[in-house]
Amino acid sequence: MAVEPAAQSTLAARGVCVGYEDGQVLNGVDLEVTSGQPPIGLIGPSGVGKTTLIDVLHGLLRPSAGTAIFNGQQVAKLRFSEAKVFTAGARFMSQDSMTILDPRETVHDRLKAAAKEARKGGRPHTIDPETMLAGVGLAGGCLARTMRTLSGGEQQRVALATALATRPAVLVLDEPLSAVDPAGREAIAGTLRQMIDDLGIGTLIASQDLALIGALCPDVAFMAEGRIVARGSLTEVLAADHPDIRDMADNARAATEFRL
């Protein structure tokens, strides 16, 4: 039976475990992203398994135990029409999401194709390309530019606008603005959060940028030791008693003091 688009869609990890030859990476992770709910931030030390968890949610990696579920169906077992519904309903953006195959492709071409894909998936919206670009801090004049003339930061912003243009039920972002300068990330945060809210997109954002997470995500999960060890607002999480959390909080304070 195909997975039909739900009024409220959910992408979830249930007891996910992943291990490699050098040890266990994920050890019973539970995390749920639901459309219409505020964005969730996923933070933790580098190499702790945030991207591994996202790969499991995407169906790119099979866990050794547990499962990823989209609207009640196991992601790893989706086939044909079920997989198409998943692809339309759940979008993933990583640091390497922008691939340019046609050197003549413009920003407008990219967003137009994304909107067409959304309509085919039964997820149309009325937000025009200019507004989509404004939501990621780009002017409408960029629409006529070819993709290959954009800087790395601009390409990353267009990749994010493209993901939004498909109007997914769930959006999973892995370091979505790493190539954008800090001032640009701060400027984008407010408009991006509003667009996510307006479209009702359930969003998971994995990032080392605590300022971005704090601006976008009222709900934050801290991953350490292969599991979620703290959950709450960013302030609450950084106050939790765990050595990895204390290290991250200390580093964040040191960075703030350095900037001042």
Image (cartoon, rainbow, N blue to C red):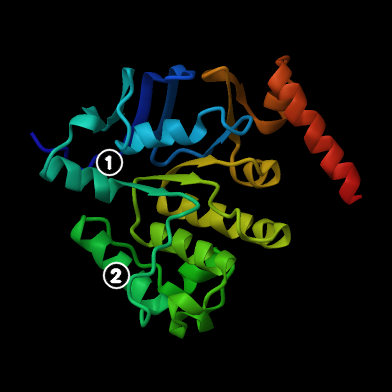
Quadrant holding the N terminus: top left
Would you place residue 177 above or below residue 59 in this image? below
Q: Residue furthest front?
A: 21
Would you place residue 129 above or below residue 202 in this image? below
For mark 1, give the secondary structure: loop
Corner quadrant of residue 19: top left
Q: Where's residue 53, x and y in %?
A: 43, 30
Q: Which residue is mark 1?
A: 7
Residue 256 vs residue 99, the one in the foreground? 99
Left of 33 or right of it: where is 183? right
Number of other residues with Cα within 10 Å of mark 1, as a class: few under 14, some 14 to 19, many 20 or more: few
Q: Amino acid at mark 1?
A: Ala
Q: Where's residue 221, x and y in %?
A: 57, 27
Q: Residue at x 33, y 23 (%)?
A: 63
Report the disc number at residue 113: 2
Q: Where's residue 36, x and y in %?
A: 41, 41
Q: Residue at x 27, y 56 (%)?
A: 123
Q: Where's residue 146, x and y in %?
A: 44, 81
Work out whether residue 70 can be spotted: yes
Residue 184 vs residue 18, the one in the foreground? 18
Residue 28 vs residue 218, the one in the foreground? 28
> Disc 2, disc 1: CB below 8 Å?
no
Left of 178 or right of it: where is 36? left
Report the disc number at residue 124: none
Q: Residue at x 25, y 67 (%)?
A: 116
Q: Amino acid at mark 2?
A: Ala
